[in-house]
Amino acid sequence: MSKEWLQVIIQAIPVLAAAGGLIYAGLQFRGWRTTQYVANFTKLVELQLQLRKMIVDDPTLEPKGSMEPARTPAEEMRRYYYALMQMGVFEIAWYTHKKGQLTDDYFASWEAAMSSIATYPAFRAMWRTDRAKILHDGFRQYVEALIEKSSVRKRV
């Protein structure tokens, strides 16, 4: 090997190291952004859960016009918001799994639990209304498919 090639190789090493460092920093930044998206999404759902809990604790806080003309009994309202809270927690699990921060096996346990919960009459009643439901569109479609799948399993 000649001196010229040796000089080229010696000069290339720091350039490759710098390029590798930039690539690594970019990957770290992308991971940080994904983590921040999940954290922001989780916080929004947590805030929704707190609002729902307030209505479960005090049904008079239910916004006027959001219920049918005949006021729903307090117990039915509690069941509705309890089912909605369960779904909110599951939405966090779904989103976290979608972003790759929840393993497939752990998410499968959430999915199995929600498949069972989706057969409960209180959950079905909650799902049929749009009252106080702010959901990710992808999650809404996912739950629709989950309910359909659980309905088929229940009939069989």
Image (cartoon, rainbow, N blue to C red):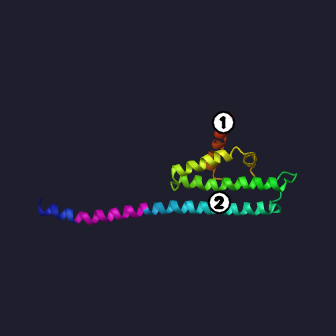
Residue corresponding to mark 2: 45
Residue 66 in view, yes or no: no
Please tell me whether the stretch drawn in magenta is mainly helix, strand or loop: helix
Choose between 111 and 98: the one closer to the eye: 111
- Residue located at (56% from left, 50% from top): 107
- Residue located at (56% from left, 48% from top): 108
Vertical side of 19 occupied by 120: above or below? above
Mark 2–mark 1 Cα distance, whole angstroms, equals 29 Å
Does dot 1 land on a helix, a strand or a loop? helix
* Magenta stretch in the rendered image: 11-27
- Residue located at (61% from left, 56% from top): 92
Crowd tier of the residue under label 2, counting other residues whose Cα lies within 10 Å: few below 14, some 14–19, many 20 or above: some
Residue corresponding to mark 1: 152
Residue 153 in view, yes or no: yes
* 98 with respect to 50 (left or right): left
Q: Which mark is residue 49?
A: none
- Amino acid marked by disc 1: Val
Q: Magenta segment: does it hold 42? A: no
Tag 2–tag 1 contact (CB < 8 Å): no
